Image (tube, rainbow, N blue to C red):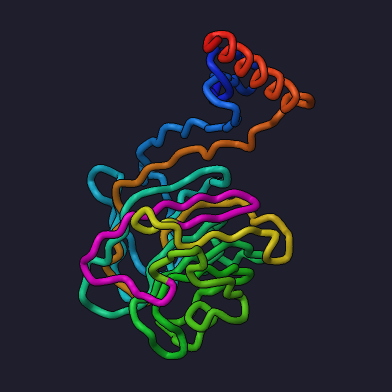
Amino acid sequence: MREIFLLISDSYFYWEDSNLTFKIIATSMVASVVALPALAAPVDLSSWLQDGGGGWNLESDNNGVKQFGNSPPGVFHNNENSQGQSLSGSIEVQSASDNDFVGFVLGYNEGDIGGGNVGQDYLLIDWKQGTQAGWDAGLAISRVTGDIATGGTNTGSSAWQHNGVVEFLTRSNATGSNFGNTGWANNTEYTFDLEFTSSNVKVFVNDNLEIDIDASDYGGDPFADGSFGFYAFSQTGGRYAGLEEADLPPPIPVPAGFPLALSALATLGWLARRRRVN
């Protein structure tokens, strides 16, 4: 059972249902709600699957993987529905060769790249190091609705140009973002955090919010459920490590009449405080 703290006045009151416990602490006249974060758990990558181009070398602790090969688009994914979760870890391109794409997929299904699937619908977060052949350096998010597998590393493909079955949505769009038009650096480790729900996606790099998009801003349909995955296109050496996964806190239901109850409790706290002062 998850515990929620409501700060109200100078005593304790609990409200409970089958899903949530509320603790009301009377310390101020302003009520606030804080959801305690779920504990993150290390990710065992031994059951993850590879699709598309390139190869992926699993590290001995099963908590890190490195992509090798200058290849067509390829992913390494967990093959399970991952909405309502966060994925955190580090990303580093351990190479000084080339300047192309690393990144992530959200809502991916086995076979969406090169597997003969139809009706693909997943999100692609890709990060290019250098401006080249019609696509600029930087971090971007797109929606993929078809097979992006190509022969070789074709710079005219939809995966490169972000057209056709790859619908470009936005580059880093959060206030204070750093990487919308800035590529990754060679042999430099970055932390990442991905938050994935049917209505919203957030991408943090080095604890800074870079991308924050709502499904309602792009046609209104919910984002499709599916896998977390790592992505590479025409770039070798991408390493993902220190991976942790956690459940995101669900929306907090507020019972009918609860705001009135909070107001009454706040008033009682204020009166009690007056009595102590007087």
Does 259 appear above or below 105? above
Q: Residue at x 43, y 67 (%)?
A: 74
Which of the pair 134/272 is nearer the observer?
A: 272
Residue 10 is left or right of residue 241, and the answer is: right
Residue 233 visible to an observer of this rendering: no
Does 149 appear above or below 122? below
Residue 111 is left or right of residue 58, and the answer is: right
Q: Residue 214's spot in the image, x, y percent?
A: 63, 58
Q: Quadrant of residue 63?
A: top left
Q: How many marks?
A: 0
Span highlighted in magenta in the image: 180-203
Does 240 appear above or below 43? below
Looking at the rendering, in which quadrant would you find the N terminus?
top right
Q: Residue 230's spot in the image, x, y percent?
A: 41, 59
The stretch drawn in magenta includes residue 201:
yes
Q: Quadrant of residue 208?
A: bottom left
Q: Residue at x 52, y 12 (%)?
A: 277
Q: Residue at x 51, y 55 (%)?
A: 202
Which of the pair 117/123 is nearer the observer?
A: 123
The stretch drawn in magenta includes residue 187:
yes
Residue 266 is left or right of residue 220, and the answer is: left
